[in-house]
Image (cartoon, rainbow, N blue to C red):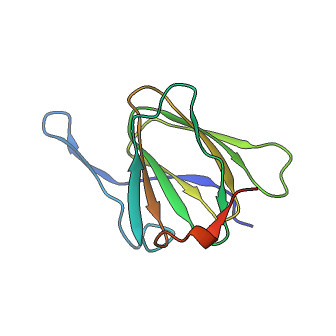
């Protein structure tokens, strides 16, 4: 099984003009079929809490800081990640169970390998 991992996204620009961060083929681990973002999560609310049969995801903190605890089948301890830069993405393979906590004002961008499919969700 593939484990979650961080990857760096190429960035161009300068402090004087601003930064452009790019997520494009062939540097991504899959072809992006859906994009969505999560905003305005209340304090102490944990998002995620589900896995997918086949869906792959790249998670990016587009703004602010997001803390993730990822449970991986076959591993006793969860893997923990902190996303706080839009130049870094977390690859989340199928069957991984994320628990996501947002700091105030954080925006989480998700690039997904397939369109929404309720049958792909694992809730237990």
Count of numbered circles on the image: 0
Asked if residue 101 is positioned above or below residue 74 in the image, the reply reads above
Q: Position of residue 22 (x, y in %)?
A: 31, 57
Image x and y of residue 45, in percent: 56, 32
Which residue is at 70% across, 57% downward?
123
Residue at coordinates 48% horizontally, 27% vertically from top-left?
Answer: 103
Q: Which picture quadrant has residue 120? A: bottom right
Image position of 84 (left or right of 69):
left
**Relative to 111, 100 lies left or right:** right
Quarter placement of the C terminus: bottom right
* Quarter of the image with the N terminus in it: bottom right
Residue with the most extreme front position: 118
The residue at the point 64 percent across, 48 percent down is: 98
Percent of width and height locating residue 66: 51, 36
Q: Residue at x 13, y 39 (%)?
A: 17
In the image, is 119 to the left or to the right of 24?
Answer: right
Q: Looking at the image, is 67 positioned above or below residue 71?
A: above
Picture layout, residue 117 above or below residue 73: below
* Residue 63 place in picture, x, y as percent: 36, 37
């Amino acid at each position: 099984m593939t484990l979650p991992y961080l990857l760096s996204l190429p960035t161009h620009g300068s402090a004087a003009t601003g930064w452009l961060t790019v997520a494009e083929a062939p540097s991504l681990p899959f072809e992006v079929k859906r994009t969505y973002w999560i905003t305005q999560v209340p304090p102490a609310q944990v998002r995620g809490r589900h896995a997918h049969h086949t869906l792959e995801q790249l998670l990016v903190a587009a703004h602010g800081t997001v803390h993730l605890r990822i449970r991986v089948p076959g591993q006793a301890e969860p893997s923990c990640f902190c996303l706080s830069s839009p130049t870094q993405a977390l690859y989340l393979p199928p069957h991984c169970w994320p628990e996501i906590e947002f700091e105030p004002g954080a925006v989480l961008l998700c690039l997904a390998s397939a369109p929404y499919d309720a049958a792909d969700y694992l809730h237990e």
